[in-house]
Amino acid sequence: MTDVICQIVAGELDAAVVTRNDDVIAFLDHRPVFKGHVLVAPVTHIDTLLDLPTALMPSLLTMAQQIAAAIGSALGAQGTFVAVNNVVSQSIPHLHVHVVPRTKGDGLRGFFWPRTRYADGEMDGYAKRIAAAL
């Protein structure tokens, strides 16, 4: 069975589509964090961010940027929260970018998970390990 986003792209499942082009589709999340929460996804099935071809990155990010700007003017949002879940917490196995309208005092506090701190000297070690993997 195809995923929900593929069904929306194929016209098999109804969605409130905001915009679409040859590469990317944007539609309202049916369970929004706040009303106006948009999902931006590649039209082609791509599982995760790690699978996204470099050639599609500009299209996906440009549309997310355009949606973020439109949310401000259309809904009076002061800003947006833009996020991509990658495997963990990715409820749909199809890459999608969340663009959530935000206003000061909306009750959403920072990220959706607890924060931690690095021990003394530990931060440089993490940076070096990630840099080495690149």
Image (spheres, rainbow, N blue to C red):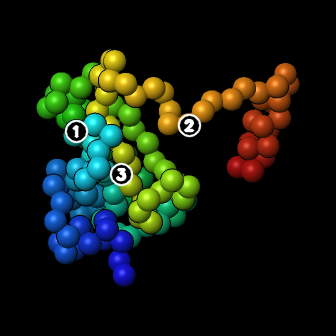
Amino acid found under the numbered disc labelled 3: Leu
Q: CA distance from mark 3 to mark 2?
A: 25 Å
Residue that appears at 34% across and 18% down: 105
Depth check, front residue: 22 or 46:
46
First-in-chain label (1 vs 2) = 1
Depth check, front residue: 53 or 123:
123
Identify the residue position indicated by label 3 in the image: 60
Is 114 left, or right, of 72 in this rendering? right
Label 1 CA crowd tier, 10 Å (few <14, some 14–19, many 20+): some
Identify the residue position indicated by label 2 in the image: 113
**Residue 59 at least partly seen:** no
Amino acid found under the numbered disc labelled 2: Trp
Amino acid found under the numbered disc labelled 1: Lys
Q: CA distance from mark 1 to mark 2?
A: 21 Å
Q: Which mark is nearer the camera, 3 or 2? A: 2
Q: Is residue 128 above or below residue 8?
A: above
Q: CA distance from mark 3 to mark 1?
A: 22 Å
Q: CB of mark 3 within 8 Å of CB of mark 2?
A: no
**Image quarter of residue 80:** top left
- Where the N terminus falls, by quadrant? bottom left
Identify the residue position indicated by label 1 in the image: 35
The kind of secondary structure element at disc 3 is helix
Label 2 CA crowd tier, 10 Å (few <14, some 14–19, many 20+): few
Q: Position of residue 17 (x, y in %)?
A: 17, 55
Q: Is residue 29 above or below residue 45?
A: above
Residue that appears at 28% across and 58% down: 24
